[in-house]
Amino acid sequence: MIATPDTPVLLALDARVRETGWAVFKDGGVIESGVTGLSTRRKLEPEIRVSHLIESLDGLAGRWNPQSVALCQPSGINWPVPALDLLISSLAAWSSERGLPQFSYTAQEVRTAIAGHPNASRDQLGYAIMLLLGLIGQSRSTHEWEAIAVGHYHRTRLARV
């Protein structure tokens, strides 16, 4: 299924260096989700992992032609994390090169809105988004549920404006 140019498509990301969850929203709901990352037990440099993520996003963008990106970033880290900084700057550059507006939210912000409190566990967030969207019984990874949560949160915020 290819998106038509007049249909707004949102690419939602649960951005992580090792594994990133993604979800595509179109016509009021989630139409596809998945996870991208290099599956290896070897220690890989963050540059290699981030480069693979950008290549994966190029493929998703080519397939779905998103008009915007919603990004959930880890929160509560109070010290420099070079790999995370590389990830965030690379995603910003990728969005900018494609002319896509990027909306960033903290994990705590999304968890509060979806599950009711900022320290909700991954399971609590997954269950809450399943309930909200009527997706009970569907099997998805934690990163997919988190990407779906940020996409839903973003779309809900836009609807209120």
Image (cartoon, grey):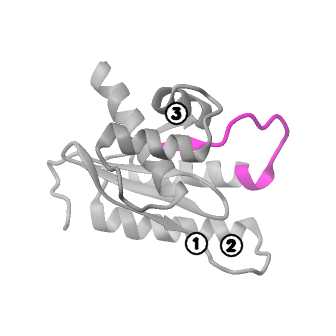
Residue 57 location (% of width, % of height): 46, 64
- Which mark, by number, is residue 48? 2
State the quadrant of the N terminus: bottom left
Foreground pick, 22 / 89 = 22
Kindly report the distance in space between the C-alpha atoms of the residues bearing marks 2 and 3: 28 Å
Image quadrant assignment for residue 59:
bottom left
Residue drawn 31% across and 19% down?
160
Say left or right for 53 vs 119: left
Q: Amino acid at mark 1?
A: His
Q: Is residue 53 left or right of residue 133?
A: right
Quarter containing the C terminus: top left
Rendered view: 160 above or below 111: above
Mark 2 secondary-structure assignment:
helix
3D distance between C-alphas at marks 3 and 1: 26 Å
Q: Position of residue 53 (x, y in %)?
A: 56, 66
Q: Specify which label sits upstream in the sequence, 2 or 3.
A: 2
| Coordinates of residue 83 in the picture (x, y in percent) | 75, 56
Query: Can you tell which mark lies on residue 110?
Result: 3
* Magenta-drawn segment: 69-84
Would residue 46 be counted in the magenta stretch?
no
Classify mark 3: helix, strand or loop: helix
Residue at figure coordinates x 36%, y 62% from the top left: 61
